[in-house]
Image: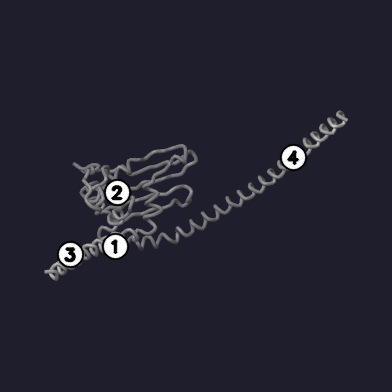
Amino acid sequence: MVADKGKKIKVAEKGEEENSEQIDGDLVLLIEKLQEIQDELEKVNEEASEKVLEVEQKFNEIRKPVYDKRNEIIKSIPDFWLTAFLSHPALGELLTEEDQKIFKHISSLEVEDFKDLKSGYSITFNFNPNPYFEDTKLTKTFAFLDEGTKITATQIKWKEGMGFPNGVNHEKKGNKRQFAEESFFTWFTDAQQKDDLDEIHDEVAEIIKEDLWPNPLTYFNNEADEEDFDGDEEGKDEDDSDDDDEDDDDDN
């Protein structure tokens, strides 16, 4: 009886092993099929990305004359780009007092993708003649190459006695922002090449290209809105003060 029982246990264990092997084999087949489907999806996604780039490239050409028209109007608005930069929550912190004086001479700003969108883009600041540097345009370019990303920038030709403006460490008063300690124009000296695309991260360029450039009017209007708000607050404080005075007179 004991021998028969042991034999039955061994047979049962063997059956479980065979079932386990069968399950493992079925699982491998399912994973292989799943991987084939994922590979198929990757091909579809790659094709979709190419189509999206083609459409984006087409509409970039349509946008260009509209951007040019916008730039012509902006040229007639005093200190437009200075105001837009200062009103931007990130970019406004990058300008020293001297930078602001230089920004008053900006005539236009341009962000241009390369014809092949995957190849890179450039950001150009155009300037009217000014007492700070000889250049009429300062450009920073990001070229995406097979060997990595190459960043090039205009080497600023400062006029005699001029150079990178230094910020002043001001004591913050109320809600007024502090000025930057390093000139915004040092951004143009950060030209380099890196082999790993993942290492490239120029936050200033990304903010200008993706946030400021599409609709700078949003930030230009922010300045006006803030001024209106400050005015309303001052008016409210004055009204409250007058009301308090009237209450005191009534008590007397």
Residue 76 sits in quarter: bottom left
Q: Earlier in the sequence, mark 4 or mark 2?
A: 4
- Could you say where residue 164 lies in the image, as x and y percent from the top left? 25, 42
Element type where label 1 sits in the image: helix
What whole-number distance in Å separates the C-alpha atoms at marks 1 and 3? 24 Å
19 vs 185, nearest the viewer: 19
Q: Mark on residue 93?
A: 2
- Please state which amino acid type lies under the numbered disc 1: Asp
135 on left or right of 47? left
Element type where label 3 sits in the image: helix
Element type where label 2 sits in the image: helix
Q: Residue at x 86, y 29 (%)?
A: 2
- Please state which amino acid type lies under the numbered disc 4: Gly
Q: Earlier in the sequence, mark 3 or mark 2?
A: 2
Mark 3 crowdedness (10 Å alpha carbons): few <14, some 14-19, many ≥20: few
Q: Residue furthest bottom?
A: 250
Q: Mark on residue 25?
A: 4
What whole-number distance in Å separates the C-alpha atoms at marks 1 and 2? 19 Å
Give the number of the mark in front: 4 or 2.
Answer: 4
Q: Earlier in the sequence, mark 4 or mark 1?
A: 4
Question: On the rendered image, what quadrant is the N terminus found in?
Answer: top right
What residue is shown with label 1?
Answer: 225
- Please state which amino acid type lies under the numbered disc 3: Ser
Q: Residue at x 28, y 43 (%)?
A: 156
What whole-number distance in Å separates the C-alpha atoms at marks 4 and 1? 68 Å
Element type where label 4 sits in the image: helix
- Could you say where residue 86 lies in the image, as x and y percent from the top left? 28, 53
Give the number of the mark in front: 3 or 2.
Answer: 3
Mark 1 crowdedness (10 Å alpha carbons): few <14, some 14-19, many ≥20: few
Q: Earlier in the sequence, mark 4 or mark 3?
A: 4
Q: Mark on residue 241?
A: 3
What whole-number distance in Å separates the C-alpha atoms at marks 4 and 3? 84 Å
